[in-house]
Amino acid sequence: MNVVLKVEGLKKFFGNLEALKGISFQVEQGEIFALIGPNGAGKTTALRIISTLLSPSEGKVFCLGHNLKKNPDKIREKICYLPEEAGAYRNLKGINYLKFMAKFYAATLEEKEEFITRAKAIADLGERLYDKVGTYSKGMTRKLLLARALMTKPALAILDEPTSGLDVINSLEVREIIKKYVKEGTSVLLSSHNMLEIEFLSDRVALIDKGNILDSGTSQELKEKYQAKNLEEVFRSSLQ
Amino acid sequence: MKKFLNLLTKEIKEIITRQLIFSMLFTLVLFYFMGELGKSEVRRAAAMQKIFALDLDGSQISKNLINSLELTNFKIDLLKGKNKESAIDTAKKSETNLLLIIPQGFGESVAKFEIKELETYTFLRTFSISGIRHSAILKGVISAINNYLSNNFLQEKVPGTSPENIKNPIKSKDFVLVKNKMAEGSASSIAGFVSSQSLLVPVVLMMIVIYCSNMVISAIAMEKQNKTLETLLTVPISRASIITAKMLSAGIVGLISAAIYMLGYRYFMSGFFRDIPTSSRATQVIKELGLSFSANGYLLFGLSLFFAILCALALAMILGVLAEDFRSAQGLVMPVIFLVMIPYFISIFSDISSLSLPFRILVLAIPFSHPFLTTQNIFLQNYQAVWLGIIYMFIVFIILVIMAARIFSSDKILTMKLKFGKKRVQI
């Protein structure tokens, strides 16, 4: 298996606050790796560092063979990041938003059209795609943003709480889309505090709390190790 | 370059909203109508003034006086066969706002050099600015009467000598020197003419700088408010390109908006000044003194304005990072407004060069002060001062851009907020 992302001893300080205390993990090609933990555990900080938004205080991050500190521009070309509370430009029509984003990644006109066709299929918004984003519901905006994130078939998709704020049906659709794209070769690093969702989606998980990774493995391995019925129980046991 | 143009186009589209276009057109129309209103007022003021007159004296002196008023831009409507009350009543019912009553025995008193009072009645039908005009007209009437009577007296007593020579025995021949050029003319009228010609300059400058800054700060604030900034910062485009696209789009739209507002302002001002001819003598003096912009002068002024805008945009980029949303962005424009207003008011009410040394250094440290000085320095051919100002603004711009680029390339773009003492960080 090729390693897409390798994180070693990653630390992050915000003034005196140590948000990450030297975490290490790796994501392999074609797998869904999840960081799970409560609010304030350090999940978003870790994802923001890997997506080149924040700089690490200590430790090393290698993404697709590039050192994050030295070549963030190279990494941006191959990843996509979907923040938890992301939005789209409200004055743009949905289709124009996708075209705008596609132009940053497409080398040719044909490639741009290919991205947009794929995004239309993922978003599945029909004629509403030709309305302004400002008129969309939260679920519609989230699907548009997921379409934006996956339309380029990135080598690594970093998804922060991908189903945050969505209803049951929309959440199910989003999970299915993510699974489908992983089969097509995209690796996914996601975070969630919804542990049942993670159990359904991810190949491997890392339990994170107060900036430390408590344990990692497949859901099955962890459940067996902690003799738990689900990941929520695993997490509770790992804290003890 | 393709990615940069993509971002620049989006930025411009984001700024040019229907509301912006509507407000610009509305301002243009408003200025136009205000200009037209001003024009009609100016025309009315310049037109022949109509006055009712009641001559209760009927002497030769009073008749001559009324004739002399008709020769000095007043149209006299002589009321005949009326007494004071009926004359007031007639004037009240008409549209004429002034009534002059020459009392009985006026001619006799004037012949004896006794002061006799004329009665004037002003009918105030509105309390607007146009109402103020009446007192000016009245002053004109009294001055014309005094002039007529004193001239008559002097001609009678000193025949063969011009009354004007007796009233004003001394006259001066005024010369003005600017650098090593000299011309005949009054310093106040030349200074007045030059300042009226460059009246638009500080207004243009102030508007452009404030407008552009507001746009940049708002653009960043909107990215934060709509939660689009994080996504934008992770797409494959350099941070320098993001900064440049935001600054350039705001600069382009700001310049277009300022040009439209200036067009409106020109309409407005031309309403007041279009019909006032500039004397050819004044133009000649201005030319002789070299107080007009050459092509080189325009180029220097353009350069100075350009760098002031660049400084404003770079400063606005840094201030924009502090904004959390669109509302907080409005408050963050205030430092830029203050920095522009200080030299603006000094340039209007005082002279920067006449300030005390510490205060002058303080004012000159504000990059926006230099374009305000540029016009004056070009007129006075102080090209060295103009160039020093441009170089200073360039240095300030480079420093501000480096600071903005560092902020955009660091965590600060996400963590810097205008929360004194505390940082709010999402973990």
Image (tube, coloured by chain):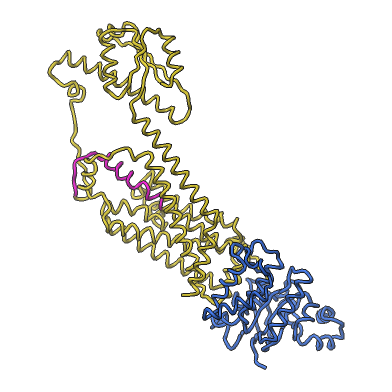
Is B190 within the magenta? yes
Q: Residue at 60% x, 87% y: name it.
A: A64
Task: Tell me, by letter, which chain the rendering colours yellow.
Answer: B
The rendered magenta stretch, by its main secondary structure, is classed as helix
Q: In the image shown, does B56 or B158 lie closer to the viewer?
A: B56
Is B99 within the magenta? no
Instruction: Determine the image quadrant of residue B192.
Output: top left
Q: Colour of chain A?
A: blue
Residue that lies at the very extreme toward the front in this rendered image: A127
Q: Residue at 20% x, 38% y: name it.
A: B174
Q: Is residue A84 visible?
A: no
Q: Which residues are magenta?
A: B181-204
Q: In the image shown, does A121 or B44 lie closer to the viewer?
A: A121
Relative to B148, residue B416 above or below: below
Compared across the picture, whether B236 is left or right of B373 comes to: right
Q: Is residue A56 visible?
A: yes
Q: In the image shown, does A118 or B225 lie closer to the viewer?
A: A118
Q: Residue at 72% x, 80% y: name it.
A: A35
Q: In the image shown, does B204 or B426 lie closer to the viewer?
A: B204
Instruction: Determine the image quadrant of residue A156.
Output: bottom right
Task: State the image coordinates of residue B46 (x, y, percent, origin top left).
Answer: 34, 31
Task: State the image coordinates of residue A221 (x, y, percent, origin top left).
Answer: 81, 89
Quadrant into which the C terminus of chain B falls = bottom right
Relative to B162, residue B408 above or below: below
